[in-house]
Image: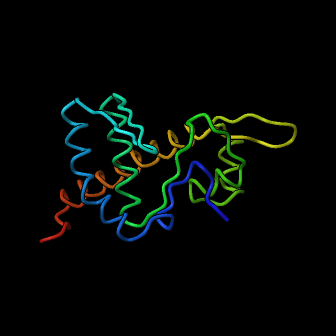
C-alpha cells in the first residue's frame, strides 16, 4: 500500500538516496538564506528552473531533512478540518478531554450534522498557546525557587 500523496515516507528512498539528500541539504539551505533560491527540475531529458521564495526553500529543505533522517513528513493545508478523534490525536489528548475543550469554546470548531470538525490551524494555535502558558508557569516556579534559595546548585 503506497503512502498518501501528502506524505513523504523515507521508506520510499534507498539508503543511498537518503545519504545523497543529507549531503545536499546544506546547499539548499544556503540558497534559501541568500534569497536566491531556484529549483531545478529534470524529467526525461527536459529541464526547467523555477524561482521560489526563500521561505519555500526552507520548508522544502526542512521536510527533506526529516526524511533524510528517516522520519515521515506530512504536508497538510492549514484549513484542513479534522474529526474530533484526529484532533485529539494531534494534541495528544483523549477525545473526551478535547470534547470538553470544544464545549468550553477554547478551540473553535463547527458542526457537520451531529459531528464536530476542527481546523488544523486552530489546533496549532491552541497547542502554541498551551506551550507558552506552560513555559511561563515553569519560569514562575524557577523564579520562586530562586527567591527561596531552593534552586539547583544550592
Q: Quadrant of residue 96?
A: bottom right
Residue 33 vertical placement versus 28 (above, below): above
| Closer to the camera in the image, 90 or 47 | 47
Q: Position of residue 128 (x, y in %)?
A: 44, 44
Q: Residue lying farthest front?
A: 45
Q: Quadrant of residue 24?
A: bottom left
Q: Position of residue 83 (x, y in %)?
A: 72, 48
Residue drawn at the location 26% of the way across and 44% of the way down: 28
| Closer to the camera in the image, 90 or 77 | 77
Residue drawn at the location 68% of the way across and 45% of the way down: 82
Q: Position of residue 77 (x, y in %)?
A: 57, 37
Quadrant of the rendering where the N terminus is positioned: bottom right
Q: Is residue 103 left or right of residue 129?
A: right
Quadrant of the rendering where the C terminus is positioned: bottom left
Q: Is residue 9 left or right of residue 81?
A: left
Q: Is residue 36 left or right of residue 138?
A: left
Q: Position of residue 3 (x, y in %)?
A: 61, 59
| Total marks in image | 0
Residue 149 vertical placement versus 112 (above, below): below
Residue drawn at the location 56% of the way across and 54% of the way down: 91
Colour setup of the view: rainbow
Q: Residue lying farthest right?
A: 113
Residue drawn at the location 21% of the way across and 36% of the way down: 33
Amino acid at each position: 500500500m503506497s503512502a498518501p500523496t501528502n506524505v513523504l515516507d523515507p521508506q520510499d528512498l534507498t539508503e543511498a538516496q537518503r545519504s545523497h539528500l543529507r549531503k545536499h541539504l546544506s546547499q539548499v539551505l544556503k540558497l534559501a538564506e541568500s534569497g536566491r533560491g531556484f529549483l531545478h527540475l529534470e524529467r526525461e531529458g527536459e529541464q526547467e528552473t523555477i524561482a521560489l521564495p526563500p521561505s519555500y526553500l526552507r520548508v522544502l529543505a526542512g521536510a527533506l531533512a526529516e526524511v533524510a533522517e528517516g522520519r515521515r513528513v506530512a504536508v497538510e493545508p492549514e484549513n484542513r478540518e479534522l474529526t474530533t478523534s484526529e484532533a485529539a490525536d494531534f494534541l495528544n489528548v483523549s477525545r473526551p478531554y478535547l470534547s470538553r475543550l470544544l464545549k468550553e469554546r477554547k478551540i473553535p470548531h463547527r458542526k457537520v450534522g451531529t459531528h464536530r470538525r476542527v481546523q488544523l490551524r486552530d489546533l496549532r494555535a491552541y497547542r502554541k498557546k498551551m506551550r507558552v502558558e506552560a513555559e511561563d508557569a515553569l519560569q514562575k516556579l524557577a523564579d520562586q525557587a530562586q527567591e527561596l534559595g531552593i534552586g539547583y546548585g544550592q
